[in-house]
Image (cartoon, rainbow, N blue to C red):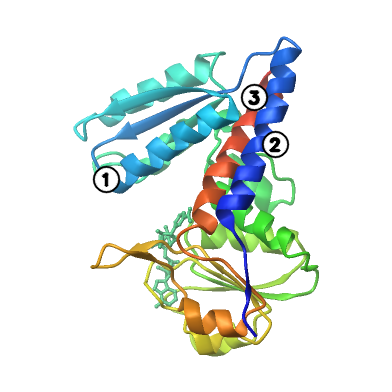
Amino acid sequence: MSAQLLDGKLISAEIIDEVRSQVDARVALGRRAPALAVVLVGDDPASAVYVSNKKKACERAGFRSLSYEFPASLSETDLLALVEKLNADPSVDGILVQLPLPKHIDAEKVIEAINPLKDVDGFHPYNFGRLALKMPLLRPCTPHGVMVMLEKTGVDLVGKDAVVVGASNIVGRPAALELLLARATVTVCHSKTRDLADKVRAADVVVAGVGIPNFVKGDWIKPGAIVIDVGINRLDNGKLCGDVEFEPARERASWITPVPGGVGPMTIAMLMRNTLDASINLNP
Ligand code: NAP
């Protein structure tokens, strides 16, 4: 069997088009277009690419995007002051502070300073807590994108065994909460998990977010399982690859996401979705 591909580029384009038509409809009724403020501190090349892609997506979605770019020397106090200013600005609906931040800035403090209603990354403890309590509002973008991809398979997740490999705050942990919300039976694995291969072998759905190229071996995949690879790793030859050994996993899975072109574009689409939702919540 060779798995069907879940095409993140295609699905994300559909979502952004859908957002665009909702924005156009609101603007036609006299509402203003949603506005997203994107804050970049430092010169991390990967962050610069992500920020530039987010700005392009804003254009496609019909949003106003505001860009704040600072050298790595920006102080925590100045960043917090900017967040406060954006919180108070009624023309701004979403605030995204690109991570990672330079070491002298406490990222948790910055995230907690964002008005939860403008927290379009969904990282604020308020939004994370709401997801944990089965009352999601602004959902963390990457795991939400994973759920939209799973929906596209048409497979009912209720009662399925899902294994999440990785337990970080931005990928594994919220992905586990999303899967639980969808009524799957969820096992969350991390660096101290024992018998990882056996756990993956029992999974109907595997979500990998580890950050190690080809970490999940193809022969761990149960025949017919759905494989969602969140990993984005750059190899020495410059190519991108995921956390799952793609070709052998594809031979066993029923559905699989490619890297690149899988979960990556979905994250940006869900950011657009969140920004529109934030704008509607703030200006009904
Ligand atoms: P992270 O913060 O480094 O977390 C990695 C997780 O993997 C941790 O929970 C860690 O366990 C676990 N882990 C590490 N070694 C392991 C092992 N040997 N066995 C089992 N678990 C292990 O990374 P992240 O930020 O979640 O990112 C993970 C990957 O997703 C990266 O490739 C990143 O580039 C990618 N990513 C993609 C998107 C997207 O839009 N597609 C968004 C975000 C991240 P401990 O908790 O025990 O340390």
Q: Secondary structure at mark 3?
A: helix
Among numbered discs 3 and 2, the one appearing first in the sequence: 2
Q: Is residue 50 left or right of residue 169?
A: left
Q: From the image, tell me which residue sits under label 1.
A: 45
* Foreground residue among 102 and 47: 47
- Residue 215's x, y, as percent? 41, 78
- CA gap, disc 2 to disc 1? 30 Å
What secondary structure is marked by label 2?
helix
Q: Ligand 1 falls in which quarter?
A: bottom left
Q: Residues within 10 Å of mark 3 (few under 14, many from 20)?
A: many
Q: Residue furthest left?
A: 73
Q: Which mark is residue 279?
A: 3
Say which quarter of the image contains residue 60.
top right
Quadrant the N terminus occupies: bottom right
User: Residue 96: percent from the left, percent from the top?
Assistant: 46, 34
Residue 276 in view in this figure: yes
